[in-house]
Image: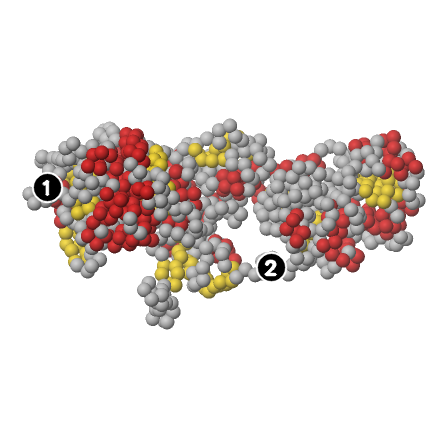
Amino acid sequence: MSEHPTVEKIVINVDGKDVEVPAGINAIEAARLHGKEIPHYCYHPKLSIAGNCRMCLIEMGMPMRDRATGEPIMNEAGKQKIGWGPKPTIGCATNVAPGMHLKTDSPMVKEARNGVTEFLLINHPLDCPICDQAGECRLQEFSADHGRCESRFIEEKNVKPKHTTLGPRVTLDDERCILCSRCIRFSSEIAGDDCLGFVDRGTYSTLTCYPGRELKHNYSLNTVDICPVGALTETDFRFKMRVWFLKRTNSICTESSAGSNSTIWSREGKIYRITPRRNDAVNDTWMTDSGRELFKAIETGDRLTRYTVDGVHKTPDETALVATDLLKGGAVAIVGSAHSSVEEQFLYSLMAGRTDAKVSLIRRTGEGDGILLTEDRTPNMRGALLTGLISELPAGDVGSLAESIKSGTVKTLVVVNEDVTVFGLPTDILSKVKIIYFGTHANETGRVADVVCPSLSVFEKEGSFVNVSFRVQKFAAAIPGPKGVLPDVSILEKIVAALDGEKPVGGITHDILWERLAGKIPQFAGLTWSGIGDEGTAVDPTAFLDLPFPERKHLKFDPVAFKKVPVAPVEA
Amino acid sequence: MALKEKRLIMKHVDEPGYTNDIDCYLKHGGYEDLKKAVALKPEYICAEVMESGVRGRGGAGFPAGMKWKFLDRKSGKPIYLICNCDESEPGTFKDRQIVHKDPHQLIEGMMIAAFAIQAKLAFIYIRGEFFQGYRILEKAIEEARAGNFLGENILDTGYSCDIIVHRGAGAYICGEETGLIESLEGKRANPRIKPPYFPAALGLYQCPTIVNNVETLCDVKHIVNMGGKEFAKIGTSGNTGTRTWCVSGHVMNPGYYEFACADITLGQLIYDICGGLKPGRKLKAVIPGGSSAKVLRADERFRGTLQDGTEFDWGIEDIPMDFDSLAACGSMSGSGGVIVMDDSTDIVEALANINYFYAHESCGQCTPCREGVPWLRKVTRRMVDGEAREEDADLLKSIADQIAGRTICAFGEAASWPVQSFIEKFKDEFVEKAREQAARRKEGKKPATETTLV
């Protein structure tokens, strides 16, 4: 990554090859950079070093120097001799130094890995056929790679507690636990809730919660993700599906403006779980528990699935036509959404421009946790600002529109996925205007709306959000939406083009939309849809730095520091 | 008999009328060395300790002066001194004698050491089971404080340092210095990874810390008393000072005996000092430095070259009792616990007993030790229970080889050295046991289970 271009590079030798690596990283990362995998369990790049699994044992040597004179000691070939350690050393706690030599697959290293693997397996239940971790289990993978394939252990295995409930979302099988302490370190170092620990000693060491405590913090499922074996399992996902049947789709968490990168695991149109996806600029490798449960909302029965005009089922084209006619009548107000994607907001903003409409958003804030749940509970408030949908932050509800409606200056109201009846516009006021409603689920506003366009949820469409640090991040469609429902951008394109008398682009793509975005919005200049990488692209926030954003400091964002040094606009 | 103990640390201990209170200690010249020390420069004392060549008495035998030299003085953080009194190595019982019988000697040695390294605070981490010792130390510290030998403004020098006695948490691993520090901080005694947590730089509360054994700290007092050069004259080069050998097992007079390093041989220790073996028995094996040291077989010949180049060819009785000679014989002087086994010993049962101890004491932090050592225990347990197999000897050796050198702390070695050496030297007995038991099983007889130890 080029975000720290100033990091000093040093030369080390990995398995006989001189390679350049950034100073300060450990041997595991250095080897990884050059295609050598050093197997490990307890090491996690975002946690402190424990060094207890002993799987990452490697051979390490330093160029020899004469103790007395400090002169390099040379061999016959005229090269500096390497003083190899007599014992293998752990890669996780070995930080690279200039001239360091590493052997990652010497006989001694292989022997050590083989030994550690055998030890880890002797008391392991070996119940892979019924274990949820199978298929994504480090122990399973490394046992295949580094194990001895047959057991020499004929004694009785240790017995430990099975299916222990650690908290509302996590179930523990202590017999599978390899005591790597990742979950313990995560809870105390990242989640800030030191609730896990080991009891008993030696081979009877057992992971458990401290007396009277539960693993119930909002990050508890991260312990499941980082558990290298099947000890910690997600109670909800347990026994539901084999991971190798699941399709993985990159997505973005919509819970708050943090914009945690996520992976959606689905099969045959059904989502089974959501896990975090590593992005060191956004969420490291973490995600909230509450953000992982958002997909359950789309499974509820009150999804909107039909385009209707005055309650009568229509085709999308017919619906768009009616909506266009309504909008052409003028006196339009739009209640937009910071849950819409950048592309949708762009089209709504065009719609507002072409109908001279006033745009309001609803403010959704809550208490932040200082980690990955920010105060702004919308994923794309920055997108609304960048696309010009709004120019200042929403004040609260949309009650102020009531006056305009009563006075007749607003005759058509466009509502995007909000139930405005609970945000200051009760049904008796709504009855005074024509309503065009875009939404995923039925609600009171949708019920009284004249034109209803069903929308797709974030899991069913593609698009992008701009997070708290002005990083544009893409999400892809994981599952198909309800039959017959078009992506919002398609129906919006039909309406917005018609407003200006243009011919809508049939089958509008995000490539085309981003050509327009790049042309219209200076911060997006030079960006293309395919050019936004999996880890997103930071854009220039300067124009908006003085707005009173509600976000306070969290894991990767500090408003004070951000004002001083906004992230570079474009990364190489 | 010409052999005479050279009692330095145990000088007054066991003298009739010698008690562990301060009056008796002062009567015997106590705290004079502290008075002498605080008039010296701290660096001078450190240099004296360096010159004395005194090596750590806790087991590893690392030069104490060198340890002190590694101390990170530039960090600006407070420096701590810890006395490791968690004596738990099976076969070792010297520290307890000092604490019980001459606690003021330890306190004086500690205060000199604390002054030398300019420690802010000193701790005695005493084994949890030594409750009597804890009470004696508490009383002695009160007496010493009353005499202004510790506490505020010691002997009006302006230097202040107190001693806190901390009772251990009842685990062998608390004696490992980084495990001890963790325990002292109130956590599980899980040893720390080194690097980066070398106590001299990142010890107690992440501050520079020196951890020394009880006997080592007592030696500091005598180094100040006689000067580093004079101290270095005791014993041989590289093996200076006296060692207290704790002899246990099948000898007539077990006990502790203090000798200058290399002053006696193992044979003299067993036969002359300890009165020999029980009548009619023959020597079978000796573990010379606590149960984790490698075993020596009685009929072995030890050949090789010492560090100074001299060649040697010793029988077990000829081995001089010091650090380097025992190391040259493939074992170690460790903590000085000499365990003598005669020909009545069932070697498999002896190993089963040792394995039981180490499996019980493994802290469980790192994989090889946590999983490997209990496996060793399970195998030897099965062997003594009558289900031995001929291949078990090789299996044991292989498991031990997979532990040693791959763990966080030296416990891995401590647990695997006995196994490696027992198998290397007594493999015939392991195989013989398996055959015997196979024959019994064939005849439908019950296995001979005599041992109740494991």
Position of residue B267 in the picture relative to residue A261 (left or right): left
Horizontal and vertical percent for residue A299? 70, 35
Quarter of the rendering occupied by the N terminus of chain B: top left
Counting every numbered tag in the picture gives 2
Say which amino acid is labelled 2.
Ser
Q: Tell which of B97 and B281 is nearer to you.
A: B97
Q: Tell which of B272 and B113 is nearer to you.
A: B113
Say above or below: B136 vs A386. above
Colour approach in the figure: secondary structure
Q: Residues within 10 Å of mark 2 (few under 14, many from 20)?
A: few
Kindly state the secondary structure of the residue where label 2 is placed. Answer: loop
Q: Chain of mark 2?
A: A
Q: Tell which of A399 and A264 is nearer to you.
A: A399
Query: Can the viewer see residue A413?
Result: yes
Horizontal and vertical percent for residue B155? 30, 42
Horizontal and vertical percent for residue B150? 32, 39
What residue sits 9% from the left and 36% below the top?
B280
What residue sits 22% from the left and 34% below the top?
B23
Position of residue A414 in the picture relative to residue B72 (left or right): right
When asked about the image quadrant of residue B157, the answer is top left
Q: Tell which of B284 and A410 is nearer to you.
A: A410
Determine if marks 1 and 2 fall on one subunit: no
Q: Chain of mark 1?
A: B
Can you identify the residue that label 1 sits on?
Answer: B272
Q: Which mark is residue A2?
A: 2
When asked about the image quadrant of residue A336, the answer is top right
Kindly state the secondary structure of the residue where label 1 is placed. Answer: helix
Say which amino acid is labelled 1.
Asp
Horizontal and vertical percent for residue A172? 51, 34
What residue sits 39% from the left and 35% below the top?
A201
When asked about the image quadrant of residue B101, the answer is top left
